[in-house]
Amino acid sequence: MSTASMNDAQGNSPRYASSPTVSMTVITLVLGMLLPAVVSILMLMASTQSRISEEENMMRAGLVEGMGLQVDEVVDALAQSLEVIAANGGADADDATRWTRLLQASRAFGKQFLEFHVANPNGDVISSSASLPEGINVADRGYFSTSLATEGMVASEGLVSRHTGQIALYFALAVRSDEEAHSGVVFAGFNGEVFGDMLRKAGPRSDGLTVFVLDRNGDSVYEHLPSGGRHPVHIPPADLRDCADGRRAWLEFGGTRHAVSVMAKRLATGEAPYLYLLVSTPDESFFSLSTLRGVTPLLLGTLCVALAALAAANRRIVHPLESLTRKVQAIEAGQPLPVTAMESVREIGGLQTAVTRMAQAISQREQELAWFATHDDLTGLANRKALHEMLAARLDRLEEGASETVAVIFIDIDRFKAINDSMGHTWGDNVIAAFAARLGAFMHPLHAFCARVGGDEFVVVPDASATHNVVRDTRALLAHLGTPYDINGREVRLSASAGVLFVGDPGESPDVIIRNANAAMHRSKERGFGRISIFRPLHLDSYMLRLDIERELPLAAATGQLHMVYQPIVNASDGSLHSFEALMRWNHPRHGSLSPATFITVAEQTGHVGLLGDFALREAGACVRRFGEAGLLTPGLRFGVNISPAHLMAQDFLSDIESVLDAVSVPGDRITLEVTESALISTGAELMGRLETLAKRGLNFAIDDYGAGYSNIQYLASEHFRVIKIDKSLIDEVHLRDRMRAIVRSTVQLAHSLGCKIVAEGVETHAQANLLARLGCDYLQGYLFSRPVPETDAMRLAIRAMEQGTLLPPEAHPDA
């Protein structure tokens, strides 16, 4: 028997299992099954990558749009500032003092701007809000010559500041005299820090993105790179315009292809856009060169193994690839991965593991993108975008005939600006996070929708089933939000104001609804903190007035619209002049005379109260000096100046007051700082240390508006407060009601026992004056003696007091 026959008889396999024809058949079969599976995987993975890229496109576009809106706001504000400066300075272009005052006020208004300057027609810088070296000339700057030939504001390309060495954009406006002749150019610039601030406000997930702000030439003036640092680029303007017009969605720069979103912003007059906002991510398409380089060895290795395995590959390769295809299909459809376990070669197993990890990473990334697209990063509440979508859905139901009521509650933290300024932004963020957590916890059981729409602004939309109790629930919410907070081991007390809007017209847009609820909230603040107001159309008038005040307040002092008036305070015993209270007035060019209560509140909330406080102190100090020069500054004559709580708690409060006193050369003992009792309640412990420092300069302190709603006697014990001013609300009926007389009498007795003097405010009748003197009041103030008057009239009152020995009308004299 042959050897071959013996092997067959023993059941052993032959040395070669098949002929070459059979092997090729198997190879063809394997390739025919393997290659479609691989191609299918590649196509499905590319489809998944395309879906992820769309979400990134939306995120980039949202970030660009958010920055674009802020660019518009900043440039509009800057244009208004330049127009005001040019209009108020052009009439007397050689008045350096006037220019300096205007520029300094503008600098305080726009701290985001790098510098404000005025140049004469020759380009010589003659006045500046910054400390510039002498001899700077800007005649060689393109924006200077262009502005002289242009009616409106012009903008420059990115230029290196000759003052700071930083890249800045400059905006210029020609200053014209009454004869329309050029008397110079006023110009301002801002640097990359402005765009960095815009980026932080525009979106919470900007860290992983590359952001460029490019000028009209395509040169970057600001860069935000995921790795940090600076890496300026130049991109041809034509390519940028193509992207901004939607003809392209990618650019190559820095040696890398990038998917981009671009917005072109026209900042001033001219044909070409003056600024491009660009947000990009590296192009991570599955078919990009770098990705293929990494995938190719794996695919080649898989094919080699498949060919070597021959028929066994049908079980160990083709089946796993079919499973892998199903997994990728599940990934594309957003479904859970099918659970499969089978034998496979190492390369295919590695690919399966890689796909599984990719699926997990994609799922996590999608969840993060979806969450951050609709939520606020700091508080975890819904953001403005989610609020708009929710309101739109509720309004759609109303239009479809749903019988439900839509209510919107706009909530704002009271005096939050003072907290931010005194404690810093990190502390302020902690306060907002704690406030939001408490708000969300309270409203969650009521199934209300809660969103953060601004710095310390929140919107609550109750569930349709709970709208009949909106006012009651809002009142309970404000009380809950007003209980003390523990912030990093420190007790913090907050209050909040709310505006409630009931939607009457389903055709209104979410923007209009939010604006109207905001107007109702501001009405609450006008009435006093911690209140609730239901929206009425008339609230819009005061809201629009507030917007005008907010926009024009920073330059009101520099343009001569603000001035001080003075009301005398007399001795109750004989009517002799004791002191004056300095009061601020604003003669608005369109709205007429504005009450301090109107614009002081706006100044506190917008951070401009320090400007007003400085103005009041400076003007009162100058008035004291002029009284002295006129021989009217009698011994003991003092001038009271009201200080806002927000100004009291500002970080530069002490230096502001000391610098003003030094500038006007007035001794501190001639000035009395009047602090409202509400300020003491909210800032008491921290304020005492500051008063100690100021007392060393000789300043006096008075508690103003005592009894207006707090009457906390613990501050009467402070050795710094030697004068207490009883609020007009207690004086109005003191001669008519026994209870009022008892309150005033007990307050006078308490103050005198502590060594304090009493001033009765709002005295208007002879009966009040006589009774208050008998009750023991030391000083009187009110219309009976004089309304608040300009400085020249105040001097006449002082002369009359010196000549007659009294300002009391004869029939009101206590001895009469």
Image (tube, rainbow, N blue to C red):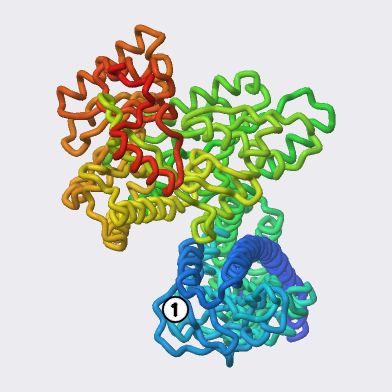
Quadrant of the snapshot with the N terminus: bottom right
Q: Is residue 243 something one can see in this rendering?
A: yes
How many marks can you see? 1
Q: Is residue 604 left or right of residue 305?
A: left
Tell me where residue 131 appears, x and y as whole percent: 39, 78
Residue furthest to the bottom: 140
| Rendered residue at 65%/34% (across/down) | 539
Please tell me how crowded label 1 is: few (under 14), some (14-19), or many (20+) other residues with Cα within 10 Å: few
Residue furthest to the right: 400
| Rendered residue at 63%/41% (across/down) | 543
Residue 138 against residue 226 in the figure, above or below: below
Q: Nearer the viewer, residue 289 or 81?
A: 81
Tell me where residue 699 appears, x and y as whole percent: 22, 47
- Say what secondary structure mark 1 lies in: loop
Residue 582 sits in quarter = top left
Q: Nearer the viewer, residue 615 or 167?
A: 615
Q: Is residue 398 left or right of residue 225?
A: right
Q: Is residue 63 something one can see in this rendering?
A: no
| Rendered residue at 32%/39% (across/down) | 675
Tell me where residue 236 appears, x and y as whole percent: 69, 87
Residue furthest to the top: 738
| Rendered residue at 32%/51% (across/down) | 627
Quadrant of the snapshot with the C terminus: top left
Residue 403 against residue 33 in the figure, above or below: above
Tell me where residue 438 appears, x and y as whole percent: 44, 34
Residue 175 sits in quarter = bottom right
Residue type (three-letter) at the residue carrying disc 1 = Gly
The residue indicated by pointer 1 is 229
